[in-house]
Image (spheres, rainbow, N blue to C red):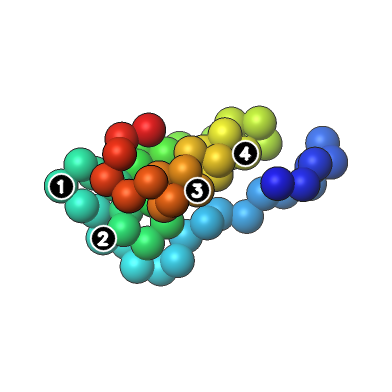
Amino acid sequence: MEKLKANQKIKSPCKLVCRLDQQGMCVGCNRFLDEIANWEIMNNEEKFDVLKKAHLRMQLGNISI
């Protein structure tokens, strides 16, 4: 992933699917409900961390990260 500038806004990874699986993870963006709910109040470092975790979840399937 590329390096972000301090004032660069990170876009939500929402895919407009918005359906949670049995573990409470969105099947569209691979984020958990708390990550989705808190997205707007997260700083860039926190958002970037969520994006990395969501990407790993997508790659690994049902493994909880």
* Amino acid marked by disc 3: His
The alpha-carbon separation of the residues under discs 3 and 1 comes to 19 Å
Tell me the distance, in whole angstroms, between the alpha carbons under discs 3 and 4: 11 Å
**Element class at badge 3:** helix
Secondary element under disc 4, as helix, strand or loop, is helix
Mark 4 residue type:
Phe
The first of marks 3 and 2 along the sequence is 2
Q: Position of residue 47 (x, y in %)?
A: 58, 38
Would you say the residues marked 1 and 2 are in contact, meaning their CB atoms lie under 8 Å apart? no
Residue at the spot of label 1: 22
Residue that label 3 marks: 55
Q: What is the spatial separation of the Cα atoms under label 2 and label 4, in whole angstroms? A: 22 Å
Relative side of 51 to 62, left or right: right
- SS class of the residue under badge 1? loop
**In the figure, is residue 55 to the left or right of 7?**
left
The answer to whether any part of residue 36 appears in the image is no
Q: Disc 2 vs disc 4: Cβ atoms closer than 8 Å?
A: no
The residue identified by callout 2 is: 19
Marked residue nearer the N-terminal end (3 or 1): 1
Tell me the amino acid under the disc marked 1. Gln
Q: Are marks 3 and 2 in contact (CB under 8 Å)?
A: no
Q: The C terminus lies in which quarter of the figure?
A: top left
Q: Which comes sooner in the sequence, label 1 or label 4?
A: 1
Which of 38/58 is in front? Answer: 58
